[in-house]
Image: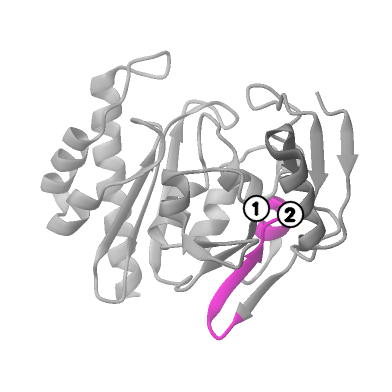
C-alpha cells in the first residue's frame, strides 16, 4: 500500500529518491498496473514520473524515440509510429486502460501477457535508462529490475513487420500473440507470447529462414504451452505455427507492394 508519494522535477531527483528508499520505492507513471491485481504493488513509496520530460514521441535522424511515460492511447494516435505497433496497441482492448497505461510501464511490468512486446522485439527495440545506458529490449527483459526506463528507441521502425493475437473475446486473455519482421537483408525476426515461459524470440528458427509448412512445424515444436481453459497444448502449438507462418507471408507481401 502506497504511504508516501513523491513528485520529483528532475531525473536526478528521481534517482536520488530511489537510492534513498531502495526496495520500498516503486516508479509511478500511469498506475494502471500498480493499482490493480494481479500486479498491484506492495511497496510503500511511490516516485511519480509525471513531471519528468519523458512524454515525447519524435524522430531523430530516422530513429523513433518514445518517452517512457507516453500513454498507449497517445502513442496509438501518433502518426509517427509504424502500422504494426499501431495494431499491437489495439490488442489492449480497453481505451480507458490505454489512456492510463504507459509504454514504459508495459515493458517493466511483470504481467501475465504482453500484447506489445512481440512487435517491439522483432523491431529490435532498445531501452534507454536513467543512467543514459542504451540496451536491447531483449536484454532488459532477460533481467528486469528497478532501473528506470526513460525512452524506447526503434532504429528501424518501418521494416516489414506484422503482428496478430488470438483470443476468444476482444477483452479476454490471449491464447497467443505473435509478431514477425523482415530486416533489410531479409533476416527473419519472430517473437511469441503466451505459449511458454513468457515472451520470447525464436532465434533458432529465425536462423533457418523457413517458410510455409516447414516453419509451421518448427514453431509448433519450439513453443512449450500449457493446457488451460484457453485450449489444449496441441491446439496452442498448432495455432502458433499457423499464426507465425501467416505473419511471415504478410511481411513478404509488403515487399511486393
Question: Looking at the picture, how far across and down is residue 51, in whole percent?
Answer: 86, 58
The chosen color scheme is one colour
Q: Quadrant of the C terminus?
A: bottom left
Which residue is rendered at x = 64% and y = 27% of the image? 39
Mark sitting earlier along the chain (2/1): 2
Q: Nearer the viewer, residue 139 or 213?
A: 139
How many residues crowd mark 1 within 10 Å: few (<14), some (14–19), many (20+)?
many
| Relative to 32, 143 lies left or right | left
Tell me if residue 236 comes above or below residue 106 in the rendering.
above
Disc 2: which residue: 15
For the question of whether residue 41 can be seen, the reply is yes
Asked where in the image residue 69 lies, by quadrant, the reply is bottom right
Which residue is identified by label 1? 148
Q: Position of residue 253 (x, y in %)?
A: 30, 66
In depth, the one of 177 and 114 nearer the eye is 114
Q: Residue at x 13, y 45 (%)?
A: 213
Mark 1, secondary structure of its residue = loop
Name the spot of residue 161 as percent of width and height, x first. Answer: 39, 62
Which residue is outermost to the front? 20
Tags 2 and 1 in contact by the CB under 8 Å rule? yes
- Disc 2 from disc 1: Cα separation: 8 Å
Q: Is residue 30 visible?
A: no
Magenta region: 60-76
Of residue 122 and residue 139, the one placed in the foreground of this image is 139
Amino acid at each position: 500500500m502506497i504511504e508516501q508519494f513523491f513528485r520529483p522535477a528532475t531525473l536526478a531527483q528521481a534517482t536520488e529518491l530511489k537510492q534513498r528508499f531502495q526496495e520500498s520505492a516503486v516508479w509511478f507513471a500511469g498506475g494502471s498496473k500498480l493499482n490493480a491485481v494481479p500486479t498491484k504493488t506492495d511497496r510503500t513509496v511511490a516516485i511519480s514520473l509525471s513531471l519528468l520530460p519523458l512524454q515525447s514521441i519524435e524522430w531523430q535522424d530516422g530513429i523513433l524515440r518514445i518517452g517512457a511515460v507516453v500513454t498507449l492511447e497517445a502513442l496509438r494516435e501518433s502518426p509517427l509510429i509504424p502500422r504494426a505497433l499501431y495494431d499491437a496497441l489495439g490488442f489492449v482492448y480497453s481505451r480507458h486502460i490505454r489512456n492510463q497505461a504507459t509504454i514504459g510501464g508495459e515493458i517493466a511490468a511483470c504481467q501475465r501477457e504482453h500484447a506489445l512486446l512481440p512487435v517491439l522485439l522483432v523491431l529490435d527495440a532498445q531501452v534507454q535508462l536513467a543512467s543514459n545506458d542504451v540496451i536491447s529490449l531483449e536484454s532488459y527483459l532477460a533481467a528486469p529490475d528497478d532501473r528506470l526506463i526513460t525512452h524506447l528507441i526503434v532504429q528501424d521502425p518501418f521494416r516489414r513487420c506484422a503482428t496478430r493475437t488470438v483470443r476468444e473475446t476482444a477483452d479476454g486473455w490471449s491464447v497467443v500473440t505473435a509478431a514477425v519482421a523482415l530486416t533489410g537483408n531479409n533476416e527473419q525476426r519472430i517473437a511469441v507470447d503466451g505459449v511458454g515461459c513468457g515472451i520470447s524470440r525464436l532465434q533458432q528458427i529465425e536462423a533457418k529462414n523457413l517458410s510455409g509448412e516447414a516453419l509451421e512445424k518448427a514453431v509448433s515444436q519450439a513453443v512449450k504451452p500449457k493446457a488451460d481453459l484457453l485450449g489444449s497444448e496441441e491446439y496452442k502449438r498448432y495455432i502458433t505455427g499457423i499464426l507465425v507462418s501467416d505473419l511471415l507471408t504478410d511481411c513478404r507481401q509488403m515487399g511486393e507492394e
